[in-house]
Image (cartoon, rainbow, N blue to C red):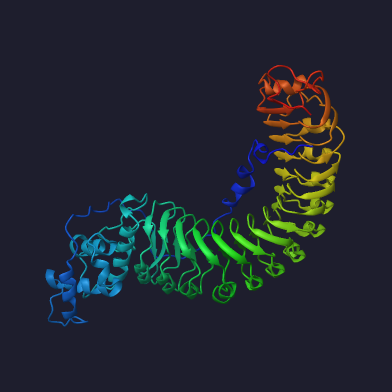
Amino acid sequence: IPTAAISEIPTAAISESPTATISEIPTVTISLAPTISPESSSSSAPSISSSSAPSISKILKLSSVPSSAPTSINCTDPETRERLLMKSFVAISGEKSFFDPNSPQSKAAEWIINEDPLNVNPCTFSGLAQRYAMVVFYFALDGDDWIYNEGWLGGTSVCVGWQKVSCDRDGLVSSLLLSRNNLVGKIPREVKELTGMQLFQAHDNEISGRIPTEIGLLQNMVGFDIESNKLEGELFFDEVFELTNIQFFRASGNQFSGTVPWNNVIASFPNLVQFWIAKNRFVGNIGTQVGQLQSLQSIFAYDNSLTGRIPSELGNISTLKYLDLENNLLEDAIPEELYGVSGLKRMILTNNFLTGTISSSVGNLSLLTDLWLGNNLLTGRLSSDMGRLSLLENIIVGYNQLTGPIPSDLGNLQKLEYADLSNNELAGDIPTSFFSLPVLEILYLNNNNLIGSIPPEISNAPALLDLFLGSNLLSGTIPEVSPGALLTLEGLRLSFNNLTGTMPSSICALRNNLLPPGNLICLHADCSSIPPDTPEISCMDGCCTQCTHG
């Protein structure tokens, strides 16, 4: 029996169902209780003049400036003020940072010295290092082109009116919420001066280069989110493990490489709640030490090149809700201990090299909404205990080596929307219980060994979009559908079976968009033949969209 090409399978693509839902997992809000709310300001950032940055000669003269200005020095004198400010900036960034007049550091120094409406006094202004770091950050990441930059480079404290900035009671920046904000460039090492930072969120931007090691100095950090950027190099450098208060660590969707030092993760991040490193270039095993993370709720490590076994120690994490390890090189059996994590909502292990069976203990995962085990090497039968997963919305077990009948108990899954059981060796009849499920949209049973006829109960399916039954051993005629039924159906694939007779006019009516209006776009059947043979299915002109020779 020919195997249907993967590219042919979804009319409503898999990526539009379960994969997309990953991004819909609610973002955990980290309450920092800022004293000052990051309200937008109507003031716009002043334009930057074309005047040159402080000269190297001025920088080199700074050594003559005392480390603390004596009282006789007039700190508001323009030349003295400039020298004192530059001394502070060089202490933070180093002299070399100012050799280029177009560097973010030079631009920041020029702005604070000559253009900042606040006109800070270097002898009395306590927030100078923080203000300088924020302005360097603005220039390093092309702040003029940000979507949300109101108030930045304005004449107020960074805690008042600088959009997407929050501060604590001491006036220290506690959060930068700059996701989807067109940040382009590299994170400057001056962020080390933002010592009050608790939440740094900058996902979905164009940040490139490496993470500066100085990030490890921000030891109040609770949430660090740099997902979906162009960062590269090493993620787990020594200094990052100084962030011992971290709970939310999100670095998916970059170009990080290397291995994950699980011992360090366990020792340094004991309060970890989210560990997201998907869509990178990580290799190596998942360490058994992961079972010690007793607050962990989600692990996203999909789309890497991780190898070895799934640790049975994951079963020790009673708080675990989301596990996504798809698209790796993992092997061996799914550990039985994993089925004991009663709070698990999503188990996503597709596209690996997993072997063994799907344990009947899967029925114990009463909160499970997504079970993705497709494209592995799994064998054995589908357990009727799956029918106890009353919250299950998506089940993907296609492209394995499963055998036996399809349990009719799957018809108990009243929340089921997407079921892919295709490309296995499943046998027996099609359970009619599928067609009474109220929200089932996708049913892929193609490329199996199913027998019997197509049940007339397909007319009862209220929400079905795709019904793929091709490449089985089905026989008999194609049933008529009831008036007004299957109006949502977009794809019906019946090719490569032993069906005979005529394509019912009630199905063709759906295809031809007659009244009542149908939505059938794709209708495949064995309506072609090689003379002198006649087609197994007779299909009127304009009805079937693809005729095959079964």
Q: Position of residue 438 (x, y in %)?
A: 73, 39
Q: 437 or 23, which lies in front?
A: 23
Count numbered badges in the picture: 0
Occupied quadrant, residue 506: top right
Q: Position of residue 467 (x, y in %)?
A: 73, 35
Q: Is residue 232 above or below residue 1?
A: below
Q: Is residue 261 visible?
A: yes
Occupied quadrant, residue 454: top right
Q: Position of residue 264 (x, y in %)?
A: 56, 75
Residue at the image point whose x is 74% and y is 62% from the top: 332
Q: Is residue 139 left or right of residue 266?
A: left
Q: Is residue 77 visible?
A: no
Q: Is residue 169 above or below residue 367?
A: below
Give the residue furthest to the top: 541
Position of the C terminus by quadrant: top right
Q: Is residue 100 above or below residue 538?
A: below
Q: Is residue 445 left or right of residue 287?
A: right
Q: Is residue 526 above or below residue 244?
A: above
Residue at the image point whose x is 83% and y is 48% from the top: 403
Q: Is residue 203 left or right of residue 446?
A: left
Position of the N terminus by quadrant: top right
Give the residue furthest to the front: 531
Q: Position of residue 131 (x, y in %)?
A: 30, 66
Q: 432 or 550, which lies in front?
A: 550
Residue at the image point whose x is 40% and y is 71% from the top: 214
Residue at the image point whose x is 27% and y is 52% from the top: 43
Q: 65 or 325, which lies in front?
A: 325
